[in-house]
Image: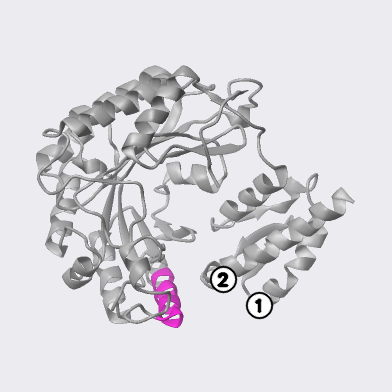
Amino acid sequence: MARPFLENVDFSANLAAQDWPAAAYVHIPFCRRRCFYCDFPISVVGDRLRGETSLGIQQYVDWLCAEIQATPSLGQPLNTIFFGGGTPSLLAAAQVEQIVETLATQFGLAANLEISMEMDPGTFTLAQVQAFRRAGINRASLGTQAFQDDLLEVCGRTHRVSDIYTAVDWVRQAGYDNVSLDLISGLPGQTLAQWQHSLEAVIALKPQHLSAYDLVLEPETAFGKRWAPGEGPLPTDELTAQMYRMASQMLQAAGYRHYEISNYALPGFECRHNLTYWRNEPYYGFGMGAASYLHGQRWSRPRTRVAYREWLDHYIQAAGHLDEGMGDEGDRLFETFMVGLRRAEGIELSQFAHQIDVEQVCRDLAPYVAEGWVALEGDRRLRLTDPEGFLFSNTVLVALWESLAAADRGNAQ
C-alpha cells in the first residue's frame, strides 16, 4: 500500500540502474460527474467547464508543473507518460503541451516515447483530439465501458453508444494508430447476451488494444453503498466468470493476445506504461492522489485538491525525500510476484533462488497445478493459466503469500 509523503530519505542516492524510473503517471482529476462505480480522486466540474474555460483547471495544471519541476531526475529519460483520471480529455491542448514540455525539461524524453491519454467519448471534438495529437499524445484510451445505452445510464456515464462510434472515428481521423477501448463486465442488470454484443461491437471497431475489467464494488461508491457482491441486480459470480471466459475466447479468436489478466492487445501494441506496473518497475507519479514507486517504496499524494495544494508547498521545500526506510523486503518480493502473475508469461522463479526456496514454493502450489490454475514450465517459470488461473488468481496469491511468509518465519528463527 502506498504511504503518504514523508521526509529524510534521499531517493537520488545509490540508485542501481534497475531503479531508474523511466515512466510517469500524471493524474488529471476533473470529471463532468462521478460514475457510480468510481472511487478515484476526482473533482466534478459539470457539463460546461473544461480546460479552456476554467481557471481552476489551469491552476491545477500549474500546480502539477510545479511538482514536476521540484522532483529530481533519477537517471534516464522517460519512455512512457500516462495521463489518467478523472477525464484528461477535458484539458485544453495547450495545458497538455505545458505538462509534456515540463516533463521533457525536467527528465528528458526518449525517442520512442509512448504518451497515453484517457479520453471519455463525448468530451472532445475532432479539432480538440487533433490538437492533443500535436501536443504529443500518441495513444488514445477510450472509456467506452458498454455498448448499451441503458447500462451506460445505470453506471452514471455521460456518453452514449453513438458517442463511442464518433469518438473512435475522430481519434482515427486525428492520426492515432494506437487506440485502446475499455469494457466493464458484471454491471447491474447486465446479461451474458449484452456482454457478447459489447465484445462483438468492440472487435468490429478493430482497436489495437482492449481492456476488459470486472466491476469492483468499492464501499464508498454509489454502487458499493447500494449493493453487496452477488446481490441483485448485480450478476452472480458464476455469470461474471462466464463473461470472463467469453471475453478471453472471443478476443483471442479475433487475434488479440491476452497478455495480462484484464488486457488484450494486437502483437506489438501492449500498453508499455502499464507493463511498468506489472513488472514492478519504478515510476514517477504526479498530481492529486497519484502514487510513485521509487527506490523500493510506494508513496502517495493527498486525494483532495486542498490537501494536495498544502502538500505541494511542503514538497517543494523538501523534494525527493521520504522519512523512513525502504520498506519490508518480503513485502516487495510478494508485490513482484503479485503483479508479475497478472501477465500471461508469469514469473521466472529461478531469478529469486537467492531469496526463496523455489522447490518449497512449487510444492506449496502443487494443488493448484493439479487444479489446472497454475502452470510450472521450463526453468521453474510460474504462470497462471488462461482463463481459469486468471479467474482464481486471488486464491493462488493467498497460497503464495502463505508460502513466502512461512519461509520468512523459518529464516527468522
Q: How crowded is mark 2: few (under 14 residues within 10 Å), some or many (20 or more)?
A: some
Cβ–Cβ below 8 Å for labels 1 and 2? yes
In the depicted structure, whether residue 381 falls above or below residue 4: below
**Location of residue 354 in the rendering, given as x and y in whole percent from the top left corner:** 80, 44
Reply yes or no: does residue 345 show up in magenta: no
Label 2's element?
A: loop
What distance separates the C-alpha of mark 1 from that of mark 2?
11 Å
Residue 228 position within the rendered picture, expressed as x and y whole percent measured from the top left: 41, 74
Relative horizontal placement of residue 339, taking residue 141 as reference (left or right):
right
Q: Callout 2, which amino acid?
A: Phe
Q: Mark 2 points at which residue?
A: 392
First to last magenta residue range: 236-248
| Amino acid type for the residue under numbered disc 1 | Glu
Indicate yes or no whether the magenta region holds residue 238: yes
* Left or right position of 125 against 311: left
Residue displayed at 79% across by 67% down? 363
Q: Tell me which label, 1 or 2, sits earlier in the chain.
A: 1
Closer mark to the observer between disc 1 and disc 2:
2
Residue underneath mark 1 = 371
Residue drawn at the location 28% of the way across and 81% of the way down: 193
Q: Where is residue 109 in the image (x, y as percent from the top left)?
A: 40, 24
Q: On the rendered structure, is 22 left or right of 208?
A: right
